[in-house]
Structures are given as structure tokens and as C-alpha cells.
Image: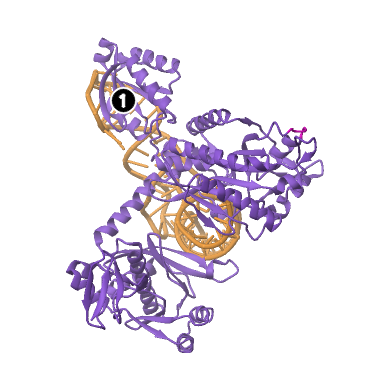
Amino acid sequence: MIRVTLADGTVREYPPGTTLGQVARDINPRLGREALVAAVNGKLVDLSYGLGEDAEVRFYTFEDEEGRDAFRHSAAHVLAQAVKRLFPEAKLAIGPAIEGGFYYDFDVPRPFTPEDLEKIEREMEAIVKEDLPIVRREVSRQEALEFFAARGEPYKVELIRELPEGAVISFYQQGEFVDLCTGPHVPSTGRIKALKLTSVAGAYWRGDERNKMLQRIYGTAFPKKSQLEEHLARLEEAKRRDHRRLGAELDLFSLQEEGPGFPFFHPKGMVLRNQLEQFWREEHYKRGYQEIRTPVILNRALWERSGHWDHYRENMYFTQIDGVDYAIKPMNCPGAILVYKNRLHSYRELPIRLAELGLVHRHELSGVLHGLLRVRCFTQDDAHIFMLPSQIKEEVIGVIDLVDHFYKVFGFNYKVELSTRPEKSMGSDEIWEVATRALQEALEAKGMPYKVNEGEGAFYGPKIDFHLEDCLGRTWQCGTIQLDFLMPEKFDLVYIGEDGAKHRPVMLHRVVFGSIERFIGILTEHFAGAFPTWLAPVQVKVLPIADRHMEYARRVLERLEAEGIRAELDARNEKVNYKIREAQVQKIPYMLVIGDREVQESTVAVRHRAKGDQGSFTLEEFLGRLKEEIARKAF
RNA sequence: GCCGGAGUAGCUCAGCGGUAGAGCAGCGCACUCGUAAUGCGCAGGCCGUCGGUUCGAAUCCGAUCUCCGGCUCCA
């Protein structure tokens, strides 16, 4: 007998050759139904795997990432099988599981149409109904190459050729369909109860734009219909929260044909922006930052010196003034450096923290523009810290704390990543090594968990990135901290040390919001447009019920305005229900309903957008609470 | 930039070779109303832009711009 140790530590015995599927059913029928794949001694395998010796076994269901990935990966195979049935000439590329679903890339003579997608989906459902067993088979490299060469699958042949020497090559077969795959897979196609193809798009073979463009079909799959429906509902919710849609509905900003990627901020969007900037200034002044502003257009020679000309030119815009070449700034650092260099600095002054809400322009490819999240001009809440080498750790920690404070004010969770030297970069390995280690040490001193992104740093230095997580679990890069030993070198920055000699300062680039525009986009989606009162473009709407309440309503409005509250009066000749609905749709935090009773008693009837009717208050009482809520930045 | 899709009234969309439509929003009138849409009326469009086919184009074809979904890239 074979001893099988389960995840909970229990040990069971089975005759040799017992499959994992049988073990799962033996443990309990429900696990038998729900298990999708398993791990034997930590290695992922199919349920058809037959046990040969004592082993630790763990089962995975759709609730586990391992199970979900195998499930979606199997769904991708079903997709490929359906496509091969309907379009035998299609060449198979790759088809992995991804966050929330799967895709498969095909090389086809003509792109898929939405109608094709429907047909393919129906064929997939047929394949599921056929409940074909998914069978693994290990083959030799020779056999694999011959098989796919004979089937006319050049991409598979390429993949096999590139497998390392001695790699186990396996095929997975379901009915007539065979794919090269390491697996594991679910036991049969019948497991994929609920599936949907969501979109079709072009994608380069191996993600390289020099390669051929393939057709990628995206889809998602679940073990239960209800889960698929929930998933689709979540997508609907995401659409409802889309900042582009809310931005238009709430009249915050617009994007116009006349300036693709250059957002227009409307009065209500400007209120948001100004609140964010005011908060930002307060917090920075508290922490010893000084604010500067540097020009948008600067001489080309400056950009050549900074290295942008060599490393960032394709993202920059250029112009000429009196026949001389100038560039529109894509970053604020050279400007800040010129401010630093404008006079001599003593070691006693350091660190010097120069903050700038700097408007930068970058040429982004037309296809990547996306509302406020991806634009061609944006305002970085930048700062450049010039410091002694001995101050690095402390300053980095200071910025980490600042970022943490900011994100907490908005209720964001975030993840931290450390990006190292990219291919296209300047400076010696040694400098990069020192800078990267400094960032690492600061993170470790804070006890912050982080992920390393090899080769994702800026061209002048490694960076710590902060990725905000929104309410739907998507992440966005916002804050970054970048350590830079190179610019000080290039620009010959110095400070006078204790010894009276010139020394080289270290420079740190950092942003907290990242870009004000992007941050507003994320905030809009995060709060679904219902901004906390301190940010709300309109904080209070006064709603008189009938004409005779207008005069009192006006007095209420004036009082609110005198207290610095952003208030509006709905003086239109409409029913109060109508006015309330409109204020709700505009997501205004407070509505003050004014009728006979309120005029009579000198009160206001307070309605909150989420909590509903709050009853009557005197205006002063309401004001007190409101101001307290604003001061607390409650959300 | 590349692949696919889409551009019709402020917004959401119908019309898909034969005189441009609806709902909402807007404006006017009536109603003076108590916590998410009162009724009636009016106005509003060179059907993204340019070119072609046709007796005739929102509709068919081509180009171009913008947007949407991806790829690649990034704050």
C-alpha cells in the first residue's frame, strides 16, 4: 500500500496505481466533484496521475489559484479546439490562463469577426457537452517536432525547438485536438460549465512588435453559471465606475478631438484638483519641502546634457525659438537641477527638498491613450531631494512614510515594487548596485514587503514604485521614488563640505500622486464619483420645495458660502423629488430640503446621498458637523 | 505605432440607397409640490472630415481624424 499524506496532515493508504481523482472521491464526494488538479510533493499534476509511491498530496479547486488557472487553461484548449474545427487553416500560437480568464492566439488569414466569435462560442459549448477526457502524454522532442510539423503548426514547432535540453515534453489531447502543453488540466471538457468569449484583438507573436500580428481571442470560464454571471456583473460595475463616463456625467473634465491625450479640466474638476493640490502643499510644507516652478520649454542642450536626448527623445516634443532648438519638458528634473545650481550650497543646508507641480508633455503612442489614466500631458507632483550620501536612507524612509500617509487619507491599499537597471540606461554597474541596495535597505528598514521588477527602472536610476489597488482589485502605478547618482555627475552638482572642499550630492526624484490627472481618474473610479465631502466639487445642494421657500433658501445658501462651503441652490421650478434625484445623480454629499416647516422653525432638513433622510437640524448644527467632517477628510 | 470595432441632436441609441427619428437633457407654459424622474408644448443634426460610385448617399467604396477593446509602452 501507498501512504498518502494530505494537506491537513491525515494519512491514507491506497493500492499503487490509484489515481488522484480516485483519492479525491474517496476523501469525500464533494471534493471528487470540485477538485480540478492536484500537487504531488509540491508538483502540479492532473487528477488522472497514478500514485506510484508514498507522497504528500494536495487538491486544488476553483477556489485556489492553481485550480483556477488550470481550469481557464483548459478552457483555452477548448477554444483552440473549437477554432480548429471551424477554421482548420488557423495556426495555433499560445493560450494561457490570465487574471480573470484566458486567451488563445491564432494565426489566421482573416481576422475574426464578432459573428465568428459567436460561432466559436457555440462550438465550445458543444465540446463541453461532449465531455471529452483530457489526456496527458509525454513524448520525445523528435516525436513532438514531427507531429506538429506534420500538422502544419509552425509556432508550436518554434516553441518545441526552444525548450531547454532535457525538458519533459507533453501533449494534451481531448478528442481530435492535441496541444503542446505542460499542464496540468482538468479531467475533461465537461468541467467547463460556464464560458464566454469576451473580445478579440490583435497581439504580436511573443509580444514583440517586430513579429507577426496574430488574432487573440479573450474569454472567461467558471464551473458554475452563477459565477459567470457575477463576473459579468462585476465588469458592468467597472463600466459604471469608469472615470471617463463619470468624468462626463459629473462634468469634471473632457477630452476633445482638438487635443488627443490633452485633458480639459472643467470647473468641477478644477475644484477636485485644487483640493488635492492644497492638501499636497500643506503636507509638503510640514515636511520641509520648498515649492518651485520651472519652465515647460527649455533649451535642447540641457536635454542633451541630462541624457534625455539619448534615452528619451522619442517621447519628447520639440520646437524652435529664433532658430534655436528647444524641447518641451517630459520630466522636471533638469529644471530643479538648474535651481539647485543657481548658487553654491553648504552641507549644512542639505537635504534640500525642491517640490514642483510640474506640467510635463510626453509623446505616447496614439493607441495607448486612455481617459485621464494615460495622457500626453500631465502634472507630476514632483520633488527632487538633494542630499548627502549619508542621508539617503533617512530621506527614502521619509518619502515612504509620506506616500503611506497620502494613500491612507484616501483609503487606498497599495503594493510596493522595486525596479532595477533597464537595458537602456546610463552609468556604471557599481553606481547602480549602490543605489539599488540603498532603496532595498530603506524598504527593509520599514519592513515593507515588495516585489522586484528586473530591468524596469528609469534610465538614470533604480526606483521604488507604489501601485494603488482600487476597489475592483486592479492596480495602478502612482508614486515612485528614484535614486539618482548620475544627474548630479552630469550636471556637476556640488555642495561645500565641512572640509571646505566640493563634494557630490545625491539626488532623489519622487512623486506621490504620480500624476494629478491619473490620480483624479483613479479617485473617481475608487469612489464611483461619490467623492468624500472634503473633495466633492459641490458639497451641499439647497432644495427649496416651493417658490415661497426661496428667500429662506437663499439665506441658507449665503450662510454656507460665507463659511467656505461649496454650496448650490436649485431654484428651478421643479418638484422636490426631481431636484433630489438630480442631486443624487450628481453624487452631492448633502441635500438641504427647505419647506414650510424649515422656514417656520429656522432649520434645515438634511438628506445624505448614501444615508438618506437625516432629519432636521439648525443650520449652525449642520454646519458644525459638516466642517468637522471636512476637516477630518472622512470618507 | 500595430490589429479589430465604432463615430447620427448635449447624452443614450434607432434608421443602413429615395424628404433625418425616439427617450433623456435644454427652453416655454401650467401645476406650488416633503426625500430618486408632474403634464403639455417648442426648439435642436452639412449623420466625424475629405473624396468617389449613383439620377439620388447617413446608408455603398476609398482615404483621413477621433474614440473604444487589445498588443507594445508608461506617471
- Magenta stretch, main secondary structure, is loop
Which residue range is magenta in the image? A342-346
Front residue (pair A17, A141): A17
Please provide percent x and percent y for residue A280. 53, 32
Q: Which chain carries label 1?
A: A
Looking at the image, is A117 positioned above or below residue A445? below
Q: Please indicate, yes or no, whether residue A569 appears anywhere in the rendered image.
A: no
Looking at the image, is A203 positioned above or below residue A237? below
Left or right of A150 in this view: B24: left
Q: Drawn colour of chain A?
A: purple
Looking at the image, is A297 positioned above or below residue A206? above
Looking at the image, is A106 positioned above or below residue A199? below
Front residue (pair A599, A166): A166
Please provide percent x and percent y for residue A338. 74, 38
Residue A597 part of the magenta segment: no
Name the outermost residue toward the right: A323
Q: Give the residue number, with chain letter if any, for mark 1.
A: A574
Please provide percent x and percent y for residue A243. 44, 43
Q: In which quarter of the image is residue A245?
A: top left
Left or right of A558 in this view: A21: left
Under mark 1, the amino acid is Glu
Left or right of A418 in this view: B38: left
- The quarter of the picture where the C terminus of chain A appears is top left
Front residue (pair A408, A595): A408
SS type, badge 1: loop
Q: Which residue is drawn at 54% across and 66% down?
A: A207
Q: Which chain is orange?
A: B
Q: Which residue is drawn at 61% across and 47% down?
A: A482
Task: Please tell me how crowded label 1 is: few (under 14), some (14-19), or many (20+) other residues with Cα within 10 Å.
Answer: some
- The quarter of the picture where the N terminus of chain A appears is bottom left
